[in-house]
Amino acid sequence: MRLFLDTGPFIARYSRADIHHRDSVETFKKIGRGETPYRKLYTSDYILDEAVTGCRQRTRTHPASVELGNAILSSESIVLLKVDGQALTESWSLYKERSQVNLSFTDCTTAVLARRHGIVDLYTYDDGDFQPLGFHTINKL
């Protein structure tokens, strides 16, 4: 099974003030120990950008954001997908047509990349953003 990792859980893992901090820490421990049904984990360069920037803003510490970025970039279990020209065009089209759904542009890139790679499960705290697009959202494992 495949799981796409969204921005929120990454930030929550490093921000003790985040309401999801404990759940995120436990979930990432389970992932690290292989105690989930997910054997392939994915995220994207846009999520990396959002997570590192958001972590620095929320924790107000550069070292935490660097640690997060290093964890994603050096992970042997996370596949870092990149938004190419076609994904960018498809994401922009999705963003323009979905005015009734609270999707950020990065959410649109996530949807496009997840579909491209046959991923239906997303580890996210933004349930309402992705469910209308047909994704199964998970906020705790």
Image: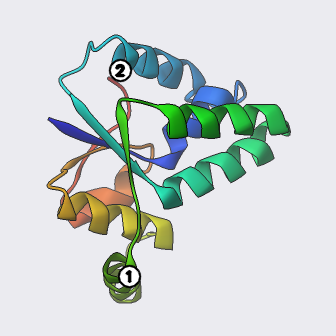
Q: Residue at x 21, y 28 (%)?
A: 39
**What's the residue type where badge 1 is placed?**
Gly
**What's the residue type where badge 2 is placed?**
Ile
Local packing at callout 2 (Cα closer than 10 Å; few below 14, some 14-19, many 20+) is some
Q: Name the residue under label 1.
A: 85
Mark 1: which secondary structure? Answer: helix
Q: Position of residue 27 (x, y in %)?
A: 41, 21
Q: Nearer the viewer, mark 2 or mark 1?
A: 1
Q: How many marks?
A: 2
In the rendered structure, the answer to whether residue 99 lies left or right of residue 55 reads left
* 89, above or below 109, in the image: below
* 101, above or below 51, in the image: below
Lower position in the chain sequence, tag 2 or tag 1: 2
Q: Where is residue 62 in the image (x, y as percent from the top left)?
A: 83, 39
Alpha carbon separation for disc pair 2 and 1 = 31 Å
Q: Which residue is drawn at 26% across and 40% down?
A: 3
In the rendered structure, the answer to whether residue 101 lies left or right of residue 35 reads right
Please tell me in which quadrant of the rendered image residue 138 appears.
Answer: top left
Q: Where is residue 111 in the image (x, y as percent from the top left)?
A: 30, 64
The one of 129 and 38 positioned closer to us in this rendering: 38
Q: Name the residue under label 2.
A: 31
> Do callouts 2 and 1 mark residues in contact (Cβ within 8 Å)?
no
Image quadrant where one finds the C terminus: top left
The one of 59 and 125 positioned closer to us in this rendering: 59
Q: Residue at x 52, y 37 (%)?
A: 72
Image quadrant where one finds the N terminus: top left
Confirm whether residue 17 shows in the render: yes
